[in-house]
Image (cartoon, rainbow, N blue to C red):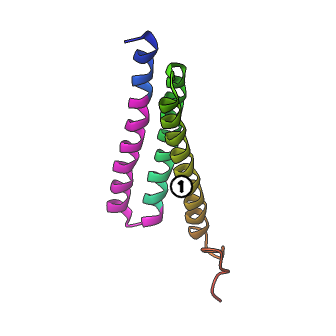
Amino acid sequence: MLPLDAGIAPIEFAGAFLIVGHCIAGLVELARSRDLAAARLLVIQGSLWGLSLKTAASLLKTIELHNWEQIAAFTAIFALRTLVKRVMTWEATLLKGQSHPGTMRHGKPPAS
């Protein structure tokens, strides 16, 4: 194992830990307050942070890409993580809009 590999594993673990920790926090928030939007925001926030760390770890692994198969695998992982992050950011924006009365929900003006 290269010294770089030893540094990548803790970064990936921290990303996974953030995701799992925020999922648990979301469940606790849901059980405590019954506020689904707040629980979803917690999960989204943790997922975005965790995915950022996991993406950083994947980028560090690019130093070891030696053939087209490895490059294609990295590109697919990076594209999927980018897509997931964009969808979660979009959903967080919608949820934040729902938590404020009188704001637009799902692109529709509030009912009068």
Q: What residue do we see at 54% from left, 19% from top?
A: 63
Is residue 10 a member of the stretch shown in magenta? no
Q: Position of residue 89 (x, y in %)?
A: 58, 54
Residue that badge 1 annotates: 88
Determine the image quadrant of residue 108.
bottom right
Q: What element carries label 1?
A: helix
In screen coordinates, is 64 left or right of 26?
Answer: right
Is the residue 71 above or below the residue 82 in the image?
A: above
Instruction: State which region is magenta.
Output: 12-37
Q: Tell which of 99 and 108 is nearer to you.
A: 108
Q: Position of residue 70 (x, y in %)?
A: 48, 30
> Predominant secondary structure in magenta?
helix
Q: What residue do we see at 33% from left, 49% from top?
A: 24
Q: Residue furthest top?
A: 3
Q: What residue do we see at 42% from left, 30% from top?
A: 12
Is residue 36 a member of the stretch shown in magenta? yes
Is the residue 78 above or below the residue 59 in the image?
A: below
